[in-house]
Image: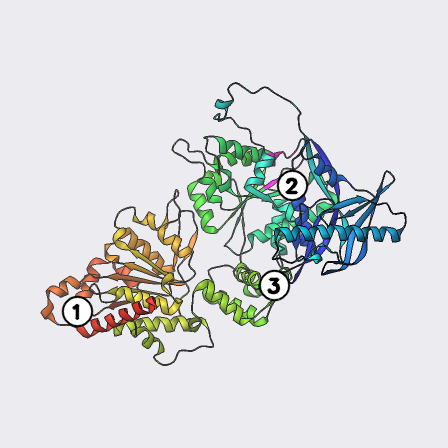
Amino acid sequence: MSAITLEVPTLVKEVKIANQKYFYIRPLFLSTPFAVSGKYETCLNQYKKELQSQLKHTTFHQKNQEELLWLLFRPKMEYRFFTLSFRLGNYSVQGMIGAALFELQGYQFVHLPSLQNYMFISKSSTLPELEEEIRETVRLLMRNLKNDQSKSNKDEPFDAEKYLSTRKEFVSIVSIKIQLTYDKYKFEEQDEKFFFNIFSPEVNFSGEFEIEKVGYCLNELYPSGLKRAYLRDAEVAQLFSLLIEPKQVNGLVLVGEVGVGRHTLINECVARYLAEAEETVNPNEKQQFWYINPNRIIAGMSVVGHWQKRFEAILNFAKSPYPDAKTAHSIFIDNPIALLQIGKSSQNNMTLSDVLKTYIEERSIQVTLIATPKEWKKIQEKNRRFADLFQVFRVQPPDAATAIKMVLHQRREVENTNQCQFSVQAITMLFNIHRMYFNNMALPGGVMKLMTQLAVKYKGSLIDLPEVRSEFKATSGLQEHVFENGQSFKENEVENELSAHLVGQSLAVKSISNAVHLIKARLTDSTKPLSSYLFIGPTGVGKTQAAKVLCRYLLGDESHLIRLDMNEYIDDYAVHRLIGTESNPEGVLIQKVRYHTFGVILLDEIEKAHPAVRDLLLQVLDDARLTDSLGRVVSFSNFIVIMTSNIGATEIDRNINLGTGNVEQAIYKKAIENHFRPEFINRIDEIIVFNPLNPAHTLEIARLQIRDLTAKRR
């Protein structure tokens, strides 16, 4: 294996895509690899990454030697522009063409990169002759291109501009280092047992190759691809001393809520190290920093024992990247709970953590986990010995004033990257949206996520209040008349709208409208669900319809209604189906809530649910949070929880002569107290009794259903 430095002549052009200007960078003598970006620095770094990715671990053999030689080819050249003015039939060509001129063994070569890398030997002896020769060559080439296009696609007109150059086009030299191996030209007889060897479990993994399949290197993102930390110098300095040689610790875990800036702090430390290393460290001895995904390690490993060998190969590569390496590579792992689960099977209890533990105990590599407080607590509970190998570095959220400064600082970077602009009013509204609806996400990440989402969608535009409202409505489903301050409800507006679709239930309409007003006024408790109800009454009186009507009014349609029939959750395993297990972490309830920003949760026939399910709901009603089997927290603070039941209705039917009103209320109250625990009842905001329907109500409901059916058929 040989380490060589390629000095690659590189063409830099400015191109237009959808009326936006971009930089386009590629090797001068080859068409690939290439990179396109709106920022030159970003484009150049992307191009270097593409080059390194294509040439990494390159084996020099007959199939690719021509490509390598063209990349190594760096003659003494001059890049000049030549004006063009000629006609191709009815088509006029006006502009200039860039050409690389160089001499080789007494011959003058002309290379035209814009014209599919066409190269010819010039016969001219003077500059005017050369100019005329190039113009005539370009004219003939474009004529052939025009004729070829007319044959293949007659409808699309020929566009000569894409072959022309601009004055901003130039050639630069880009240096990259690669490891070059040489192919063995060896011919061997095929093994007689070739067919059976296909099924052999023996396989050798190259850690250098495998680590790229399961992760990516942060070094390759330097400098523009790494997120930079702002106003966090103390945390960065402390983390830098733990991550970077020679003071590094071998096991480290960054614990903090999502959005608090854990990844940004890591990026900042890596950027500072690489900036210092440019001047002081030999390029081949630089420490590398890798993010790896535990789930990818086992992907495709169908044979028992293969994933262990693959993971060991990756760790051995990180431990000793090359012979006599003085510095081991550093590994970062998101989703650390997966380390305690991946690998288990009916035949094997070994997990990724068991393999990793040996290397950390030997202090041979550095591993950094990134976890939330709940995830870290889960790891400590499941495998204390593994958790004790890691030093905890807690990342605290900044105060509000500092978070605002961070967002305003990062705003400029987001605007430059996406060529957009945020108004002050838009930024203010983003903070208000975060405070009112997403305060379970830590700052500054909670606001930056919304800002980046808007910048990508409205690239090249001014982003003001209408764009923020539109995006928030699209992502959350919440209707503008609910979240927009400038729109106020008229008197009885909500009640009239709800009663038009919920017949004969004035008490329910009144209670639901009160909840809507509280949500509109933002007077709900952020530590609890938006509201919680127990709808009780006989079957067919509109309990489910009330939930649908409320969902349509708040969120536009019923797609945000999460409906679960509690009759299906009556066994001992019901809780696990709702919140998931280690082997199947996506429980039914957890999964649906996680992928909805807002919603209405309808739990039909709650009295039939297993007692453990109702105990689970206590946590939802009390603090609007559930934790799944992987330690991930799911928030219910933007959801309305509605439970339905018909307990007590049978007794009322049997005692029809008892009358209505207070007597029925007493029967329902007694039935509820007999069936549900007091702590469960006390956590429900309101219990609403639905009245039986009279013939007039039934007729009105029939009219509504006919009207809806007619509207759907149109």
- Per the model, the C-alpha gap separating discs 1 and 3 is 60 Å
Q: Is residue 526 above or below residue 367?
A: below
Would you call the spot at circle 2 few (<14 residues within 10 Å), some (14-19), or many (20 or more)?
few
- Label number found at residue 664: 1
Pick whichever, 16 or 461, lies toward us.
16
Three-letter code, disc 2:
Gln
**Considering the numbered disc 3 on the image, is that residue within a helix, a strand or a loop?**
helix
Pick whichever, 424 or 420, lies toward us.
420
Would you call the spot at circle 1 few (<14 residues within 10 Å), some (14-19), or many (20 or more)?
many
- Label number found at residue 411: 3
Identity of the residue drawn at 32% across and 56% down: 617
**Considering the numbered disc 2 on the image, is that residue within a helix, a strand or a loop?**
helix
Would you call the spot at circle 3 few (<14 residues within 10 Å), some (14-19), or many (20 or more)?
some
Outermost residue, front side = 89
- Per the model, the C-alpha gap separating discs 2 and 1 is 77 Å
Q: Is residue 430 above or below residue 240?
A: below
First reached walking from the N terminus: tag 1 or tag 3: 3
- The total of numbered circles placed on residues is 3
Give the x, y percent position of residue 160. Answer: 71, 57
Q: Which residue is mark 2?
A: 54
First reached walking from the N terminus: tag 2 or tag 1: 2
Discs 2/1, front: 2
Provide the residue span drawn in magenta: 317-330
Q: Can you see residue 661?
A: no
Magenta highlight: main SS: loop
Outermost residue, bottom side = 491
